[in-house]
Amino acid sequence: MRFLDREDDDDPLLSIVNLVDLFLVIIGVLMVVIVTNPLNPFSSENVTIVENPGEADMRIVVKRGEELTRYESTGEIGEGEGTRAGVTYRLPDGRLVYVPEGADTE
């Protein structure tokens, strides 16, 4: 009964080889995920990502080359410093006309 005495069944090296194959597949999947990510560190493209648009917890992530900037919403509208620069009017045909502040009205 030679066929019942198989040496391959007790070989622990076969289990390790199967684990190595599994880890190679996992590493391959992770590399594909990294390459397809828009914020890929190896990409030189400019990308803007808006998370939760219009919500109180809205976040904007801007990637320009290797620089990554994150903006988070505070929920406050119209905050900031500045002065009025002029007035914009919409004409009946849909065009916009900007009139600077203090311009001559002759």
Image: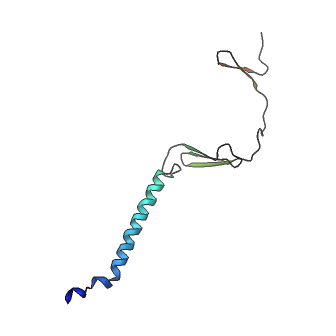
Residue 62: name its quadrant. Answer: top right
**Furthest-top residue in view?**
106
Work out which quarter of the rendered image holds the C terminus and state it: top right
Looking at the rendered structure, the number of numbered marks drawn on it comes to: 0
**Furthest-left residue in view?**
1
Taking depth in this image into account, of 16 and 4 the one nearest to the observer is: 4
- Left/right placement of residue 28 relative to residue 91 reads left
104 vs 49: above or below: above
At x 58% / y 48%, what residue is drawn?
67
26 vs 71: above or below: below
At x 35% / y 82%, what residue is drawn?
12
- Name the image colouring: rainbow
**Residue 40 at x, y = what percent?**
50, 51
Taking depth in this image into account, of 68 and 23 the one nearest to the observer is: 23
Residue 82: name its quadrant. Answer: top right
- Left/right placement of residue 23 relative to residue 59 reads left
**Residue 54 at x, y = what percent?**
68, 42
